[in-house]
Amino acid sequence: MLQILLSIAPIFLLIVLGHGLRRGGIPSIEFWNLNDRLVYWVLFPALLFHKTSTTTLSGDLVLPQAGVMYGALACAVAFALIAARLARYEGPLASSLLQGCARHNTFIALAVSERLYGAEGLAVAALTTALLVPVTNVVVVTLMVGLIRGGGDGVLKAIARDLARNPLLLAVLAGGAWNLAGVGHAPVLHDMTRILGDAALPVVLLCVGANIRVRAMAAQLLPTVLSMAGRMVVFPAAVIGLALWTGLPSAAALVALVYGAVPTAPNGFTLARQMGGDAPVMAGMITLQTVIAFVTLPLTMAVGQRLL
């Protein structure tokens, strides 16, 4: 437990540092807003392309990993929908609860996977990202439309359009295609993407901290607590159960557990605001989950290492 905490601590200290820098206006608010775009459109796509195009992964791992992650995602989604129904939440609040339970912070998951399990962990994490990003987006966005607007014309087209221009997904697909083609290492291309990828994790963790909104924690308490239950209890518990049931290899199972235990995605606030969800509550969920994850993530991984 202590070893896991010490391994993960630098990640959360970078998040705290990013928050402190933004509050202090260092270097400027405009810098952090632009930095988010740099990370999303350049640094992380470079990291994902480099890993997926150069790493040798067994084809036997893809289906079991997909089964565990999709099964756990289904459990988290079901929990959110049932909890929202029992609490009689209206569509906007129910959609934010859904995001809080089902979505994951890819950036923290990649950083933790590399920190705990090295290059092999990061490679499996890149595969897990490739499996989760499209399915999570389709499932969550489709259900949000149903909860907020009761459906509507052009929903599938809008989802397809968003996925087609998602830089993380495009980078994973390009890297996977490169890998399958057996082209191998391209000196200039892979050297450049490696350098950019090395910058991605520290910069994005600073950005996560810069986007924490402490005041947002004053949002409604019950839906925030429910989101933590779905995100940090139901999801990881389902990952452990499914990994044991399917016999998923330990290394892959532990990386899957990282994805189950990280806080919800920070861009959930933007999605809630754009689609008519409850954006203030979503901001509270993101902030509180990120803070609480400093305690829950090491505990979950310690339990996982004993069981898996």
Image: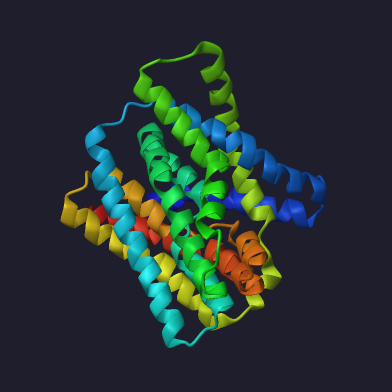
Residue occupying the point 55% across, 83% down: 90
Q: Which quadrant is the N terminus positioned in?
A: bottom left
Residue 110 lies, in percent from the top left, at 47, 43
Query: 171 or 145: which is nearer to us?
Result: 145
Answer left or right for 154 relative to 233.
right
Answer left or right for 179 relative to 219.
left
From what the image shows, is residue 276 above or below residue 115? Answer: below
Answer left or right for 82 relative to 246.
right
Residue occupying the point 56% across, 25% down: 193
Residue occupying the point 63% across, 63% down: 269
What is the image's colouring? Answer: rainbow
From what the image shows, is residue 234 above or below residue 107? Answer: below
From what the image shows, is residue 277 above or below residue 24? Answer: below
Q: Is residue 10 visible?
A: no
Residue at the outermost front position:
153
Residue 160 lies, in percent from the top left, at 51, 49
Query: 260 or 1: which is nearer to us?
Result: 260
Residue 16 lies, in percent from the top left, at 64, 55
Residue 308 lies, in percent from the top left, at 23, 52
Counting the numbered discs, the total is 0
Query: 287 or 165: which is nearer to us?
Result: 165
Q: Is residue 133 visible?
A: yes
